[in-house]
Amino acid sequence: MMKKFLMILALFSSTAKAQNTKAMTNDHTEKITLGGGCYWCIEAVFQMLTGIVKVESGFSGGQSKNPSYKDVCSGTTGHAEVVQITFDNTKTSIDEILKVFFTVHDPTTLNRQGADEGTQYRSVIFYHNQHQFKAAKSIIDELNKVKAYSKPIVTELTAYTAFYKAEAYHQNYYNDNKSEAYCRMVIQPKIEKFEKVFKNRIKK
């Protein structure tokens, strides 16, 4: 497994400088919306990364407006559980964010992460601009080319349209519920993986 993560790191480091320059904005902030299984897991990981300004758990990619968690869990709204990430692009980059994303979830399982199954748990990148689209497509193509995973990547690339914030109890879930079984058995291993691979990029 570590060999795979090191391969991912190497692929990103080769393109980071050029892409980070393109990502600059006047106020140095940018947003991207990512789905990689249960949003509690992805939220907890990205809260630890240097350069992340805000992480919110919610829903994107469906047909209905303002869906509830119960609505999305029914599998009928078309939404994915996502995190909307606001980041300072002078302190991190779209490359690094995608590197973390592809390291801490399995992008080869269709509509599933571990025991969490359903279209709401699909792997998806909702890109906010063409730079993000091109960066994500390039990375996915390269990871497939070098067979970084044992199966092809099924991560969707979809233009961002809307984000609906989940109920208050879903926000900051891991930090507020560390003793719960799901947090210990599912989220904690992802955090430990992140800490091992990105130890120099953890917020102080």
Image (cartoon, rainbow, N blue to C red):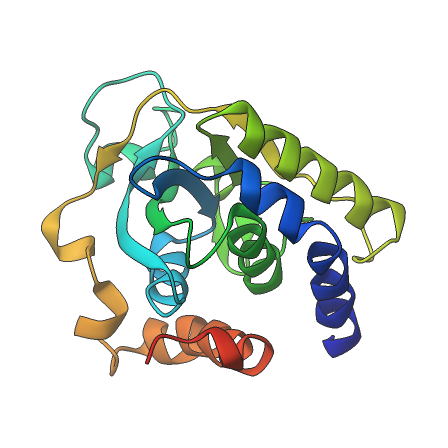
Instruction: Tell me the quadrant of the picture where the N terminus can be found.
Output: bottom right
Extreme residue toward the top, this view: 63
Q: Give coordinates of residue 129: x percent, y percent.
A: 48, 25
Extreme residue toward the left, this view: 168
Q: Residue at x 22, y 19 (%)?
A: 65
Q: Is residue 119 above or below residue 144?
A: above
Q: Give coordinates of residue 26: x percent, y percent.
A: 33, 35
Q: Is residue 108 left or right of residue 81?
A: right
- The image quadrant that residue 138 belongs to is top right
Instruction: Tell me the quadrant of the picture where the C terminus can be found.
Output: bottom left
Q: Is residue 124 left or right of residue 53?
A: right
Depth check: give the residue in front, 24 or 59: 24
Depth check: give the residue in front, 22 or 33: 22
Q: Give coordinates of residue 50: x percent, y percent.
A: 39, 67
Depth check: give the residue in front, 111 or 128: 128
Q: Residue at x 49, y 30 (%)?
A: 127
Q: How many marks?
A: 0
Depth check: give the residue in front, 45 or 178: 45
Q: Is residue 173 left or right of residue 6?
A: left
Q: Residue at x 81, y 45 (%)?
A: 142
Q: Is residue 21 left or right of residue 2?
A: left
Q: Residue at x 36, y 25 (%)?
A: 76
Q: Give coordinates of residue 20: x percent, y percent.
A: 56, 46
